[in-house]
Image (cartoon, grey):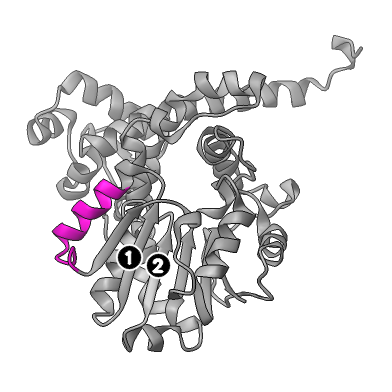
Amino acid sequence: MVTEAQLDQEKLEAFVQRIVLDVGTAMRGGLVYIGDRLGIFAALAQSGPVTATELAQQTGLNERYLREWLGSMTTAEYLEHDSDADTYFLPPEHALPLADEEFPFFTGGFLQMIVPTVTVAPAVAEAFKTGGGVTQEEYLPDMYEAIERATAPWYKHHLVQTWLPAMPGVQEKLQAGGSACDVGCGSGLAPITLAKALAAAEVHGYDVHPGSIERARANAQAEGVADRVTFTVGDGADLPEGRFDLISTFDVVHDSVDPVGLMSAIRGALREDGTYLMLEMNASGDVEKNRNPLGKLLYNVSTLYCMTTSLAHGGAGIGACMGAEKARELAYAAGFTRFRRLPIEEPFSILYEIKA
């Protein structure tokens, strides 16, 4: 056993400071959640330098709570503070990812995800003992709105503009009246985006979570395409044979119960020379290669959501950091013979074109 005299005191003290930092960061998660949910970041984005009193007047929120919140955001360097004027300022470089839902790297969905994921930590702790998991129904409804907001920039800025054109012939088939299906469609943003951009295409969405399908139908109604998109509560096993020119899964395979079964059903549901577009997280299967901010995020959300929702049903529990090699292995196990990483550089995602 190492004695106190043998310890590297500088290393020990640095690690204690790291723990303090991590605990503070974790607890601040609750406050950034509040800042997003109550529109405080949005108010600061519009106000310019503002005192706590002025911010309280603008938002209708309690000034005492705002003062403490502003202190947290200042020490986290989200805000700039002018001590002479006692004003707080959200720089435009910070306002865009925090408060502009149209920004390609908007982070509000991730902020909203903090509370519903941490809330299930006691249930996940029990699963550490039993090997089970937490079902999707056990999460706060916030979780599914958060996922929608976190992934919305993919579809707004990339799906039709960049991703479809990277796969030869796919967009042309859909423009000519072909059929597309998004499996694990969540709140339906991908099918809705396709329906709006490709008027002649037949578009479907499948998801096993009834609440998400209900939300998808409401979103389609709001976007004026409810008569052009069909949403179904179901998983890959429910897909019709030989029906689709394009099938997509966006951030779905790694948390599915039966990844090979899902991908086998996708292969069977594709038409001849159909294409499967698979998006997964930009992470490696090697933990050493994930020593970066995204890796730090993914292992956490994987444990508290992706992996546990799969294991809750006796699933594979692959987890978010499965990497390209695992994706290729699953594709070949499902009977696909062509696997290609698309030449698209995304900070958070990797895309694969997979064909039978």
Q: What residue do we see at 38% from left, 47% from top? A: 147
Location of residue 122 in the rendering, given as x and y in whole percent from the top left corner: 51, 18
Q: Would you say the residues marked 1 and 2 are in contact, meaning their CB atoms lie under 8 Å apart? A: yes
Query: Disc 1 designates what residue?
Result: 191
Query: Disc 2 designates what residue?
Result: 181
Q: In this view, does 353 lie to the left or right of 67?
A: right
Q: In this view, does 126 lie to the left or right of 25?
A: right
Segment colored magenta: 213-227
Q: What residue type is labelled 1?
A: Pro
Label 1 sits on a secondary structure element that is: helix
Sort mark 1 into few (<14), some (14-19) or many (20+) by Cα contacts within 10 Å. Answer: many
Q: Can residue 35 be seen in this view?
A: yes
- Based on the picture, tell me whether residue 223 belongs to the magenta stretch: yes
Q: How far apart are marks 1 and 2 (CA)?
A: 7 Å
Location of residue 211 in the rendering, given as x and y in whole percent from the top left corner: 30, 41
Q: What residue do we see at 18% from left, 63% from top? A: 226
21 versus 234 height, above or below: above
Sequence-wise, the earlier of marks 1 and 2 is 2
Q: What residue type is labelled 2?
A: Cys
Q: Residue 41 carries which label?
A: none
Q: Quadrant of residue 15?
A: top right
